[in-house]
Image (cartoon, rainbow, N blue to C red):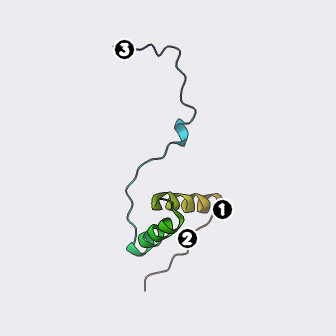
Amino acid sequence: MKTEYDFSQARKNPYAAQVRKAISIRLDTTALDYFKNLGGEMGVPYQSLINMYLMECASQGKRPRFRKAS
């Protein structure tokens, strides 16, 4: 390995804007179990399923239906 590298001709990563960001989120166990079971059936990690579902909601402009607390 070199002790020094020349980055003067380097280019910015064109995919850098598409990088995922790790966050912490609180989910109901029912929702989490649903995605874990679905992921197991489909052979897809549950985090990826949650992300795909949220991306679908965002692309279609879906809005949640809130229930008022009684």
Q: In x, y percent, where is residue 69? A: 43, 82
Distance (Cα) linking label 3 and label 2: 54 Å
Amino acid type of the residue tagged 1 in the rendering = Gln
Residue positioned 56% across, 36% down in the render: 15
- Residue carrying label 1: 60
Residue positioned 46% across, 71% down in the render: 37
Element under disc 2: loop
Amino acid type of the residue tagged 2 in the rendering = Pro
Residue positioned 60% across, 63% down in the render: 57
Viewer-nearest of labels 2 and 1? Answer: 1
Element under disc 3: loop
Viewer-nearest of labels 1 and 3? Answer: 3
For residue 69, side relative to residue 65 (left or right) = left
Q: Quadrant of the C terminus?
A: bottom left
- Residue carrying label 3: 2
Amino acid type of the residue tagged 3 in the rendering = Lys
Residue positioned 45% across, 13% down in the render: 6
- Residue carrying label 2: 64
For residue 57, side relative to residue 34 (left or right) = right
Q: Which mark is residue 37?
A: none
Residue 70 versus residue 38 in the image, above or below: below
Q: In x, y percent, where is residue 36? A: 44, 67
Q: Label 1: how many residues lie within 10 Å, few (<14), some (14-19) or many (20+)?
A: few
